[in-house]
Amino acid sequence: MSHSITFTKTLTAKKHYDVIVAGGGVAGVAAAVSAAKYGRSVLLLEKSNILGGLATLGLVNLFVPMCNGRGKQIIFGLAEKWLRESALYGFDTIPAPWKNGEPKEPTGVRYCQRYSPYIFALQMTEEVSRAGVDLLFDCIASYPDMEGEHCRGIITDSKSGLEYYTCGMFVDTTGDADILRRSGMPTVPGENFYSYFGKSLTLDGCRRAVETGDIGNAYGWVSGGNINLYGDNQPDDIPRWSGLTVEEVSDYLIRNQLKMLDSIRGQDRKSRDIAQMPLMPNFRTTCRIDGDYTMTIKEDVYRHHEDSVCAINDFDHRDYLYEVPLRALTRRGFDNMITAGRSASGKGYAWDVLRVIPPAILTGQAAGAAAALALEEKTAITDISVKTLQKRLEDDNMMIHFPDEYVPEDRTVIIHGNNMDGHIEGHN
């Protein structure tokens, strides 16, 4: 017998903020810090107990390559700042040619950095605190209060119960477009493969760490499912999860945790341990907005956009360069809502290019600056002065348009997959 209830609760606005950011991953931290820099009151909501999202909780502790693969740096801004700072207090893997900045000579060695996820999380808390952002941990952004397509505020759920905060601008960096979906903004679900990984600690690894004097060498990997980001060899009997229902998330976690346990059976129990478990699903593409512009590989490799908010590079292939238009972060009509990071509007492999840590930081930084500018200009976020935004971002050390001299003469892009929005051939 089915049973239904009507739940009614009157909430009085607890506080008003110029900008509310939902989701404290790297994109959300960047958005919050960026908006606060322009004198705006900012509230950052994070459902867990540490900041960083997949970059910390998810153990994807890697600044993927931030150069063109030939010695020219493309990604700057807060991504460059935080990459360097991630090496201050923990282990680092910055390649020798990049230790002191861009190499003087061309090199095929790429500019990347694997870091301590938990030390980096502490640094994110420090970054937010220094910026004067109000931060609420263990606080879920549940639903938007909408007046048509305008967000008046956000309902939260925490130890304090249901509460309500009003805002002038809202930034969704939940990674799953949770609030934008519930606002009525058109979104597109994704799919996620059988991939789940944690960190192991072994006696052999500890010996390597002692021999090299580098604690980073102590850690190894332990997997549940180990399918790569392209879904190669995904088992036919394993689903592809969108990650948008509690049942899907639970099924993913149960399958993978049991698989991880199976992977260590029979090993010498005194010679190893599972040192770190992912504290959120290792989902990569759950849901994105159907933005005013949707990036694709076919259309956007080497393409300049007049409303570009940052230049980025492909993390898995040399040379391929892109510009992210503001329109990929917005949907016209939703005048005070914007996204960044994993829910930016990209299709196929372009979604992968957008969602990784450095572009997530840059689009977050751009979203925060755009929100602040919209309040300043008293206009819809889709109608702000792009030139003003670009100037401010450039002043904050972001590359807006990649130099044409970085574009190779041969622009051939070979893509495989079900269509031209698949992924690029050759994982080099």
Image (spheres, rainbow, N blue to C red):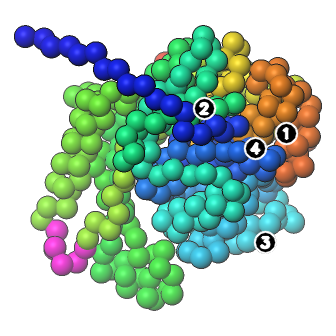
Mark 1: which amino acid?
Ile
Image side of residue 50 versus residue 96, left or right: left
Q: Residue shown at 42%/25% (left/top)? A: 10
Disc sitting over residue 400 in the figure:
1
- Residue 122: image quadrant is bottom right
Mark 3: which amino acid?
Asn
Q: Earlier in the sequence, mark 1 or mark 2?
A: 2
- Say which of marks 3 and 4 sits in front: 4
* Crowd rating for badge 4 (residues with CA inside 10 Å; few <14, some 14–19, many 20+): many
Q: Circles 1 and 3: CB distance less than 8 Å?
A: no
The reply to whether residue 146 is in sight is: yes
Q: CA distance from mark 1 to mark 2?
A: 32 Å
- Of 419 and 275, which appears nearest the observer? 275
The residue to which callout 2 is attached is 166
Q: Is residue 271 above or below residue 68?
A: below
* Crowd rating for badge 2 (residues with CA inside 10 Å; few <14, some 14–19, many 20+): many
Q: CA distance from mark 4 to mark 2?
A: 14 Å
Q: Which residues are the magenta region? A: 267-272
Q: Earlier in the sequence, mark 3 or mark 4?
A: 4
- Say which of marks 1 and 3 sits in front: 1
Q: Residue shown at 58%/22% (left/top)? A: 289
The residue to which callout 3 is attached is 100
Disc sitting over residue 40 in the figure:
4
Mark 2: which amino acid?
Thr
